[in-house]
Each structure stands twice: as structure tokens, then as C-alpha cells.
Image (tube, helix red, strand yellow):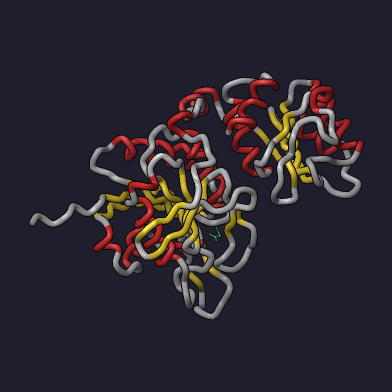
Amino acid sequence: MPEPRLPAIAVLATGGTIAGVQSEQASAAYRAGALDVSELLAAVPGLGQLAHIRAEQVASVGSQNMSYDVWSRLARRVQALCQDPAVDGIVITHGTDTLEETAYFLSLVIRHDKPVVLVGAMRPATAPGADGPANLFYAAALAACPQARGRGALVVMNEDIHYAREVQKISCAGVNAFASPNRGRAGVMRGSQAFFYSGNTTVHSVASEFSLETLETGGWPRVEVVHAGVDLGGDVIEFLAGRCQGIVLAGVGDGNATDAAMQALQRAAASGVAVVRASRTGSGRVGRNGEVDDDAAGFIAAGELSPQKARVLLTLGLSQTRDVGKLQAYFDRY
Ligand code: SIN
């Protein structure tokens, strides 16, 4: 009997704590992105029995420094690997701080249904009980799994599988730092097997109307987030309105802010800046025309997207249109 063919998985490394090295083992201080991808893979027991792995270093950054330049390179490489018939799935190692934004971005621009799995670690590679090797094992197993196809980019952390649209880093410490607060996790890993709980909640890539090429030729629209709170003034919004094509409000409660801030946002919208109302609360749905009259103000409601994901979608949306109705339709769809 011929041996069953092992799946071929491409691992693209970008840095982060998963590749982090401490100055001393008992210390909380460490440098993210210090190890290269071959060292990460060497620390994962059983990987060779799971898949044929080929690895590439795309970047070596702490993900607080993730940039549109790295996103472009990463997305182009992922797209090329998706089109390579010799590759069954793709794993991306990434810092956890902005992992959810990269996952959501990729789920919107990669046009293929091959598994793309993002993974990080909360503990550096040299820490006692480092979570990177286990997370990387599960990520490779998930990328090799036929049931992971057609679900857009997925995230694996701490044995949980998350959809790109849903996942959020909800704690700055501890290995259980990721959750999908609105719709729940997509499933779990048990050994090398994936168990999915629910259908895909993301309209991803294959059906997406966004493309990397439009961003690269037209430039990346500038979108920034304003965090609402007690006594927020309108001046910070006026400052941004002169510099940005889009502003996302990380609003109190249902995407709200002080009268001064809301009036400044209304003036920004009237001057052609796309204004999206999201919530700083971490979950829930910001709908249209509740506490705020979006129709009168010319605002867009973020739905269930967090402010940071609303920023990603608005950036992509503005690369296609400045029409508020069409932008709202993106938020209703994606
Ligand atoms: C980073 O995001 O690169 C640092 C933090 C982490 O990976 O956990």
C-alpha cells in the first residue's frame, strides 16, 4: 500500500511574541520577532508527521509595527501560495496585538478558498510553558484540514478556532487572551483534528469586491479612530477631519459621544469625510438610527465590527467609493 500523501503547508513568519526571546528566563522583558521561522518550527514536536512544511520569513516585527507595506507583501505571497497546486494550506505566524486586523484584512482580499490560518503566542519562545509550539502545531493541523477550506482566514490560539471577522484580543496577558464575543468561536482543535461548531460568519475573499491592486495603485486611504469618553471635545475630530478620508468613532455604548464630538463628526461627514460609528464596549451591534440619527448626520453604523476592524473595512471601502450608502452596504455585508 502506498503511504498516504502528507499535506503541504507553507508557513509565513512575520514576528511577534511567538518568535520572542527574553533577556533572562524569569524576566517579563523580551524582544518580539527575534527568532527566525526555522527556529520556531524546530521547537514543535510532531510537525514532520503532520505535514511537509516549507517556511519563509516575510517580516520580523512586533505586530504593533505591522504596516500596510508588510500587509501588501504578505497578501501577495498568500495569494501566490493559494494558487500553487503543490500547497494545501498556509500558516502565518504573527504578533497577537494586531493579529485580528491582519486576519480580517486577508479574509477580505485573498481570492481563494484554501485554508489560511493565523497564529501567535502570548508567551515568548524562551518562557517556561511557552504556548507558541502548541499553537503552531494546531495551526498547521488546521491548515491541513479539508474542513477549513472556504472559511476565509482563521485564527488559532489556545486550541480555539476563530473566524477572522469575529476574533478579538480581549486581554493583554494570559494564554486565553482571544475570544469571539459576538457570535462565539468557530470551533476547537483536539489533537490534529478540527471540530467546527458553526457555519462561516464571514463573507470572505472569494466573494469579496476588494483587491490589493486597487489599494496599491490608488494608495491606502487614511482612516483613524477617535476614542470617546467623558468630556471629549470636537477639536481632535476637526484635526483628523483635515487629514483623513475616514474617521471611526470608538463610541461609548451604542457608538455615541459628547454633543461637541458628535457635532464635529457631523461637520466632518458634511465635508466628505466618511464617519463610522462603532462601540468601545467590545461587543454588541451598533445599528443605524437608534440613539443617533445616522440618516440626518450622514454617518455609517459599524454593526458588530470593533473599532479596529471598522478601520480596516473603511480603508478598503474608501479604496472603492466615497458614497456613504455604498460604504454602509459594505458594513452590512462584511
Ligand atoms: C506583538 O504583537 O508582536 C507583541 C505581542 C504578542 O505577540 O503577543
Nearer the observer, 59 or 332: 332
Q: Is residue 60 visible to the viewer in this orientation of the structure?
A: no
Q: Is residue 266 above or below residue 84?
A: above
Quarter occupied by the C terminus: top right
The residue at the point 85 percent across, 36 percent down is 291
Residue 239 visible to the viewer:
yes
Horizontal relation, residue 113 to residue 283: left or right: left
Instruction: Name which residue lies at 35% across and 57% down.
Output: 141
Image-based side of 302 in relation to 252, left or right: left
Counting labels gives 0
Residue 311: % across, % down:
64, 38
Percent across and percent down for residue 276 are 72, 33
The vertical placement of 175 against 9, above or below, is below
Residue nearest the viewer, comparing 230 with 23: 230
Relative depth, front residue between 221 and 89 = 89
Residue 2 falls left or right of residue 280: left
Q: Quadrant of the N terminus?
A: bottom left
The x, y position of residue 168, in whole percent, is 60, 52
Residue at figure coordinates x 38%, y 54% from the top left:
142
Q: Write down which quadrant ligand 1 falls in.
A: bottom right
